[in-house]
Amino acid sequence: MSIEEDRVPVRVLEATGQARNWAYALWVCNGYNPCDSVFWGIMKSKPPSDRAWAICSPWIVEKLGDIVLVPRNFCN
């Protein structure tokens, strides 16, 4: 399976669970780095609440776009 086949497009404003964490971690860490402990720390924590997501998701969309590609194993 190629990297593209292992990814699922997720609308940032509608993201939930680990997909929400993935988008948030990409935003905070300026992208994905498999060795970034901050990125993986975010992935281990609970996803942002709906209230927090309503605040930060528009900023994530502004920086990353409306859709992010989330690894299949991090989708709900």
Image (cartoon, rainbow, N blue to C red):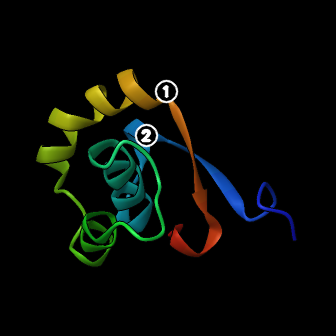
Question: The residue under label 2 is which amino acid type?
Answer: Val
Circles 1 and 2 in contact, beta carbons < 8 Å? yes
Q: Label 1 to label 2, Cα distance in Å?
A: 8 Å
Residue 37: percent from the left, percent from the top? 29, 71
Q: Residue at x 44, y 59 (%)?
A: 19
Q: Of helix, strand and loop, which one carries label 2?
A: helix
Pick whichever, 14 or 6, lies toward us.
6
Q: Residue furthest front?
A: 35
Residue 13: percent from the left, percent from the top? 38, 37
Mark nearer the N terminus (1 vs 2): 2
Question: The residue under label 1 is which amino acid type?
Answer: Gly
Residue 1: percent from the left, percent from the top? 87, 71
Q: Residue at x 66, y 55 (%)?
A: 8
Task: Give residue 12's mark.
Answer: 2
Q: Of helix, strand and loop, which one carries label 1?
A: loop
> Which is more foreground, mark 1 or mark 2?
1
Q: Residue at x 46, y 60 (%)?
A: 33
Pick whichever, 40 or 46, lies toward us.
40
Disc 1 target residue = 65
Residue 30 in which image quadrant:
top left
Q: Is residue 8 above or below residue 74?
A: above
Q: Residues within 10 Å of mark 2 (few under 14, many from 20)?
A: many
